[in-house]
Image (cartoon, rainbow, N blue to C red):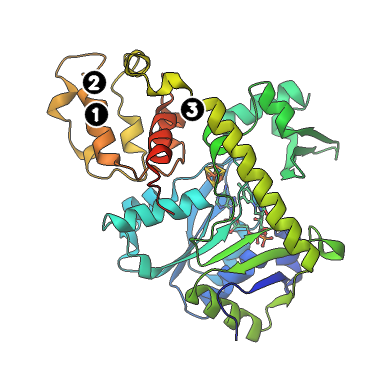
Amino acid sequence: MVKVKDTFYAWANNEDIKAKGECGGAVTTLLKYALESKTVDAVLAIVRGADLYDGVPTLITKPEDIIKSAGSLHCAPTNIGKFLVQYLEGAKNMKIAVPVKQCDARSILAAAKRGKVNRDNILMIGLNCGGTMRPVAAREMISKFYGMNPDEVIKEEIAAGKFIVVNKNHEHKEIKIDELEDQGVGRRMNCQRCDIKIPRMADLACGNWGVIGPLAGKATFVEVCSEKGAKLMDGVINAKVLNTQAPDPKGLEIREKTDGAMVKLAAKHQKKQFTQAAMDSSYWAKQYSKCIKCRGCTVHCPVIFDLDQKIMPYEGTGLLPPAMAYHFARAAALGTDCINCGNCEDVCPMEIPVSRLHHEISKRLGAEIR
Ligand code: FAD
Ligand code: SF4
């Protein structure tokens, strides 16, 4: 019997899934089995879209279609929590399995806290996450720093602290993420600050950290985080569709160490980005004076649901920039539930560092959803 906190190295039995999966296809196998066993009615996974900078949230109901979602897209930020609420009725009428990074998982928990999602109907297959990149910025970075045509890139990955790119001629280039970030490119600012790397709030936490020896790169480290996760692992092992073995004790140690190093690095970025200026109201008054009232930060926030339906009287009719009260109202709606997904900042045409303020407030108050 699988129990909460059990850990495994896991990889697919099916050769196609193993080949297409990022690290042995364990996640794809778990999602496929969840559908086949009728544990869920559907899977909401990220499928490569127009190119590898485009990840499309896709509802899959046929087990044979799951394979199209295999692989990790590091240049495809997602807004899964809001997607579930807006397009899938908050999983109130359907059981759904979702692969989630920690920010995706916490957006679902935040939505559930607000009664917008039925958490009982959601099975979260967590993915460790070292960070994502903005699609357009990633294309520019590949062109400028890698000297490659972004349209000719066939594979990108993050491994051992490097962003690695391979093009159609199988030319391979890697640059340390630290070096990229020193030059103002690399991971999104909020991912640099993100200090939750292993998504233990999900039902399972899966990633490549800690897989060493002959299985390195070919298997995924799975940590069981809930009874639901234990039941799924039991089922998939008994059905013999997932191969597992006990993790190498040294691998366990490396996983903990890597996680610790990433959390420390995030603290360093927080210190750098959470400047005194961020707590200075005149700094924020200046930032918000750039606001053009497009409301993107509200519409795309996975935690705010009701403000986007109506124009608020305190936005100030005819005023541009809006009265500061608009941003106060937004802050009140958000409370301390900012999950630092960075969507608000990504969509802001005026490049106001909206997410930084709310992340800093949540951190200072120690009141994050975990
Ligand atoms: P697969 O069977 O290939 O399944 C991958 C699943 O990921 C698919 O279901 C797909 O829908 C989903 N997915 C792909 N892109 C995204 C995305 N952008 N957002 C949400 N879901 C997505 N592991 C670590 O140990 N350390 C890390 O630093 C780390 N960083 C990661 C960063 C990102 C953005 C992602 C997506 C994954 C990261 N992982 C990390 C996890 C690792 O890359 C593998 O996904 C994991 O080991 C599972 O491998 P697999 O072969 O079982 O997955
Ligand atoms: Fe990954 Fe960034 Fe989300 Fe953290 S905030 S889980 S680093 S995408």
Q: Nearer the viewer, mark 1 or mark 3?
A: 3
Mark 1 to mark 3 CA distance (whole Å): 20 Å
The answer to which image quadrant residue 91 occupies is bottom left
Q: Decide: marks 1, 2 in contact (CB < 8 A)? A: yes
In this rendering, the answer to whether 37 lies above or below 80 is: below
Is the N terminus in the top left, top right, bottom left or bottom right quadrant? bottom right
x then y, percent, for residue 202: 50, 62
Task: Please tell me which residue is depicted at 62% across the width and 64% down the height of the picture.
Answer: 27
Task: Please tell me which residue is depicted at 67% across the width and 78% down the height of the picture.
Answer: 241
Please give the label number shown on residue 60.
Answer: none
In this rendering, the answer to whether 253 lies above or below 131 is: below
Residue located beneath label 1 in the image: 328
Mark 3 to mark 2 CA distance (whole Å): 21 Å
Q: Nearer the viewer, mark 3 or mark 2?
A: 3
Q: Nearer the viewer, residue 344 or 363?
A: 363
The amino acid at mark 3 is Phe
The amino acid at mark 2 is Met
Tag 3: Cα neighbours inside 10 Å, few (<14), some, or many (≥20)?
Answer: some
Residue located beneath label 2 in the image: 324
Q: Decide: marks 1, 3 in contact (CB < 8 A)? A: no
Task: Please tell me which residue is depicted at 74% across the width and 27% down the height of the picture.
Answer: 179
Local SS, label 1: helix
x then y, percent, for residue 120: 36, 70
Q: In this rendering, does residue 246 appear at all?
A: yes
Q: Nearer the viewer, residue 291 or 274?
A: 274
Is the C terminus in the top left, top right, bottom left or bottom right quadrant? bottom left
Which of disc 3 and disc 1 is earlier in sequence?
3
Task: Please tell me which residue is depicted at 58% across the width and 62% down the height of the picture.
Answer: 205
Tag 1: Cα neighbours inside 10 Å, few (<14), some, or many (≥20)?
Answer: few
Tag 2: Cα neighbours inside 10 Å, few (<14), some, or many (≥20)?
Answer: some
Residue located beneath label 3 in the image: 274
Local SS, label 3: loop
